[in-house]
Image: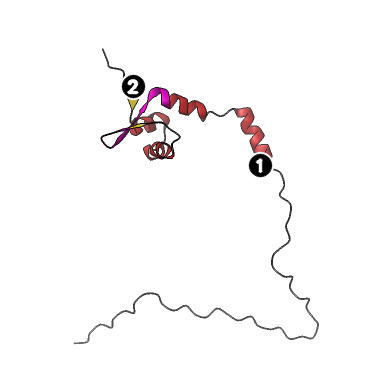
């Protein structure tokens, strides 16, 4: 006769759900998944896991409605940059300054000693 365990570790839950145990620990630390800590390791009761999964259940019809809301067009906003000045015939083209060469970062290397 096998003993049915009431508490599961984050590793067991992660393997069962197909996600990382670190994700389970994150839910525990955020307070979304109720757990107990015994000798430095977390344990989650089966009923708490079922309640957590039920709370995060998604209805496909609601999911379709949410995706429709996200596709609404975003109104165009004016550019924060000023408009370029109009070009005038006969004016010489002013060259834009180039970025100066970058200096090497960090400590300079020591020159090798000559023998």
Part of the protein shown in magenta: 37-48
Compared with residue 95, is residue 58 higher up or lower down, i.e. above or below?
above
Q: CA–CA distance between discs 1 and 2?
A: 41 Å
Q: Which residue is mark 2?
A: 6
Left or right of residue 104, residue 71 in this image? right
Q: Which mark is on residue 70?
A: 1
Q: Secondary structure at mark 2?
A: loop
Label 1: few (<14), some (14–19) or many (≥20) C-alpha neighbours in 10 Å: few
Left or right of residue 77, residue 40 in this image? left
Q: Secondary structure at mark 1?
A: helix
- Residue 26: image quadrant is top left
Say if the magenta span includes residue 39: yes
Left or right of residue 58, residue 8 in this image? left
Q: Which residue is found at the position 36% from the left and 75% from the top?
A: 106
Q: Residue 29 in the image: state x and y as whole percent.
A: 40, 39
What kind of colouring is applied to the model shown?
Answer: secondary structure
Q: Residue 2 in the image: state x and y as whole percent.
A: 27, 15
* Quadrant of the frame with the C terminus: bottom left
Q: Which residue is at the front of the view, 89 or 21?
A: 21
Q: Which residue is at the front of the view, 63 or 6?
A: 6
Q: Which residue is the extreme one toward the right?
A: 89
Compared with residue 106, is residue 80 higher up or lower down, i.e. above or below?
above
Q: Residue 23 in the image: state x and y as whole percent.
A: 41, 39
């Amino acid at each position: 006769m096998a003993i049915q365990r009431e508490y599961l570790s984050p590793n067991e839950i992660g393997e069962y759900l197909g996600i990382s145990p670190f994700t389970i620990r994150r839910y525990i630390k955020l307070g979304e998944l109720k757990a107990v800590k015994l000798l430095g390791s977390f344990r989650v009761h089966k009923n708490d896991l079922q309640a957590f999964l039920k709370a995060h259940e998604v209805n496909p019809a609601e999911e379709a409605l949410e995706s429709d809301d996200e596709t609404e067009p975003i109104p165009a906003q004016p550019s924060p940059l000023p408009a370029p000045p109009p070009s005038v015939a006969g004016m010489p083209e002013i060259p834009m300054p180039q970025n100066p060469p970058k200096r090497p970062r960090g400590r300079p290397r020591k020159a090798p000693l000559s023998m």
